[in-house]
Amino acid sequence: MRTSLRKIVLIISTSPLLLAVLCEKDNFDTLTVPNETKVSISQGPNFSLNDTIWVSGQVSSMLFDEVTSDSIRNPNETIKDLVDVLQLTEENGDSNTKEALIDFEIIVLKGVTELARQCPESKLITVAELRADMSFYEYEIGFVAKTSGDFVLSWEGPIILKNDNRNTEILNSYPVKGETNFLGLTNCEITSLILDVESSGDEFFFTVN
């Protein structure tokens, strides 16, 4: 009887482990790779007041499944990008930027824009819309310049900036501790650091005269 009881106890005690193994296996039935949004921007680098800096983004509606090597439909109903809109400033500690979304009027041709709940004075959310043929998600927005100065658009998330020139030479006029390739992004009085803008690839600089 003891032997039978031990067997029953063993089966009961190991059942959660077996379920965990099965669930873990199920989790690997699909392993998708997120697509990067391809972003194009009006080249510049120089714009005049009331000029529009156009930004367009496009990302495939299909995802690559590494387990099956197939392309599958993206189950997400919305595709969002988050971009920081900042003006370059003289060195202030580790920062050489300030919030600047208020310095632009936003025009939307495709998709939807939202102000981020945190740092709405600098962070803009772009929501892409699905094309009629369901092949891509796209957005197209314009930044109408209302203030002169040097500015940077910096994306938080996986993007590919298609512009051949990101105009990084503009940053040379705003060194931090003698470093001209250094960018201190300040949002809500919190500064995040990009130590090497040239290798980052997610920033675009321009001047409004």
Image (cartoon, grey):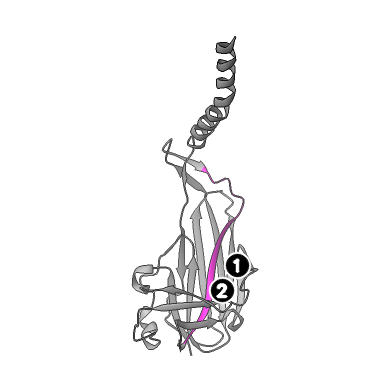
Q: Position of residue 181 (x, y in %)?
A: 35, 79
Name the residue type under label 2. Gly
Q: Residue at x 39, y 68 (%)?
A: 201
Disc 1 and disc 2: Cα gap in Å? 8 Å
- In the image as oriented, which residue stretches furthest toward the front? 2
Name the residue type under label 1. Leu
Q: Would you identify the image quadrant in which residue 8 lies?
A: top right
The mark nearer the N terminus, 1 or 2, is: 1
Residue 77 on the magenta span: yes
Name the image quarter holding the N terminus: top right
Q: Nearer the viewer, residue 3 or 110?
A: 3
Q: Nearer the viewer, residue 119 or 51?
A: 119
Q: Residue at x 50, y 87 (%)?
A: 48
Q: Would you identify the image quadrant in which residue 159 lies?
A: bottom left
Residue at the disc numbered 1: 109
Above/below status of 107 relative to 128: below
- Dot 1, crowdedness within 10 Å: few (<14), some or many (≥20)? few
Q: Position of residue 157 (x, y in %)?
A: 49, 62
Q: Would you identify the image quadrant in which residue 203 lies?
A: bottom left
Residue 142's disc is 2
Q: Nearer the viewer, residue 155 or 207?
A: 155
Q: Are marks 1 and 2 in contact (CB under 8 Å)?
A: yes
User: Magenta stretch?
Assistant: 73-89
- Dot 2, crowdedness within 10 Å: few (<14), some or many (≥20)? some
- In the image as oriented, which residue stretches furthest toward the top? 1
Q: Position of residue 94 (x, y in %)?
A: 44, 81
